[in-house]
Amino acid sequence: MPSTARSQLGPAAPSCDALARRFRDVRGRTEVLRAPLSAEDCVAQSMDDASPTKWHLAHTSWFFETFVLEPAMPGYRPFDPQFRVLFNSYYQQVGPQHPRPRRGLLTRPSLDEVLAYRAHVDAQVLELLAHGAGRAEPLAAVIELGLHHEQQHQELILTDAKHLLGSNPLRPAYRSQSPNGTRAATAAPLRWRRFPGGVREIGHEGRAFSFDNERPRHAVLLQPFALATRLVTNAEFLAFIDDGGYTRPELWLSDGWAAVQTRGWSAPLYWERQEDGWAQFTLAGRRALSSDEPVCHVSLYEADAYATWAGARLPSEAEWETVACQVRVAGNLLDSDRLHPAPAPRGDGVQQLFGDVWEWTRSAYAAYPGYRAPAGALGEYNGKFMCNQFVLRGGSCVTPATHIRATYRNFFPPDARWQFSGIRLARDPD
Ligand SMILES: [Fe+2]
């Protein structure tokens, strides 16, 4: 890759040994996440926005082959030249792509062939890192980017598998209950913490990895604000439903109300009203709704309507970041192996900033002042999506712990519900 990749996509360039260790760890974890799924599970696609697991396994390998192996190894022969189209997601500068809504039709190559593709790419990248003196170092930042890309797809493997299995009338479990499935049974009380206004800085700086969309660090002007000390719970969201929340247009953004009407929304995704109460589909199968867990799988529209009903609002991403940058990155993330949001722990200060659910903000996903997309195809990674989406912060119960940080900006369209997305309230002080 050109040197611009090093400077703009991630200034840190870890040693080849450290990178090789991390490469093995991250790539291996992807296959651990795949293991509970059958070959049939890995092929099906439940909706246009979701991809089959097999496609994720191949696409993440395609990323390393395209952006690392081909530039580093003159004369490199692709594992299969046809994969260049099949497993290209959206990189127009690389070439045409197989249409996303038709990824589930790719019964060939087989899962075994895709796993062989992964093994081939793994061996080639590790060989490059071990013996490619002079060739690997310039690509270290791109390999690092590829590992963070792989971690994004690890989360997508779980969210997309959940949508697939949740679309099956049998509601099969991805996995039986997690061994680490317990935290507090009851959520801590919701309190408000006030923060002063003033000029603050947000965004990433320094040598540690970040995506380009987190930079440059810049000043923002905040008004005084208050932030809820924990996430909104299922019980609190149920009170919104019971108060006619989904039938009261005065609570909703116009596009949100249109979505409620056209899609028939009356509860978060995966909620099911049964004779004996509400149930919820989880990666461990269907079970009774837990009152104290954070509400999850809501759109920006539902989060905003709930906030309006509650006499509050959603935080801006700048408000969120200035609070989150003061706490350690820890929480119910993928590494806790729970795969489901947990009730808020007790403690001082603002809880659950990291993990459990991605927190919708009221901030449109846009470029920071001074942002320029990197040159070349990798410049398509983030910048071209800065339109018609909203920012989510903090990671979820299926986000790898080494993938999240206070400056991390996730983004989805306002009607997206299949991610582990929830609600933290903010408000203007009295
Ligand atoms: Fe991707």
Image (cartoon, helix red, strand yellow):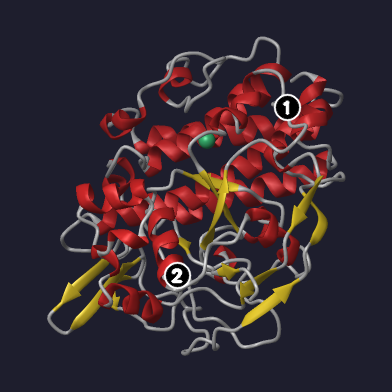
Local crowd size for mark 1, using a 10 Å CA cut-off: few (<14), some (14–19), many (≥20): some
Q: Could you tell me which residue is drawn at 58 percent across and 68 percent down?
A: 426
Q: Which residue is nearer to you in this view: 104 or 301? A: 301
Compared across the picture, whether 338 is left or right of 325 comes to left
| Secondary element at tag 2 | loop
Q: Could you tell me which residue is drawn at 44 percent across and 43 percent down?
A: 413
Compared across the picture, whether 325 is left or right of 286 comes to right
For this orientation, the residue located farthest to the top is 75
Q: Which residue is nearer to you in this view: 429 or 185? A: 429
Q: CA distance from mark 1 to mark 2?
A: 36 Å
| Secondary element at tag 1 | loop
Q: Which residue is mark 1?
A: 372
- Residue 287 in which image quadrant: bottom left
Indicate the position of residue 231 as horizontal and vertical percent values.
52, 73
The dot on residue 340 is 2
- The amino acid beneath tag 1 is Arg
Q: Earlier in the sequence, mark 1 or mark 2?
A: 2
**With respect to residue 81, does 218 lie above or below?**
below
Indicate the position of residue 50 as horizontal and vertical percent values.
36, 42
Q: Does residue 185 appear in this view?
A: yes
Local crowd size for mark 2, using a 10 Å CA cut-off: few (<14), some (14–19), many (≥20): many
- Residue 364 in which image quadrant: top right
- Is label 1 in contact with label 2 (beta carbons under 8 Å)? no
Compared across the picture, whether 112 is left or right of 128 comes to left
Q: Quadrant of the N terminus?
A: top right
**With respect to residue 148, does 134 lie above or below?**
above
Q: Which residue is nearer to you in this view: 217 or 115? A: 217
For this orientation, the residue located farthest to the front is 430
Mark 1 residue CB less than 8 A from any atom of ligand 1: no
For this orientation, the residue located farthest to the left is 275
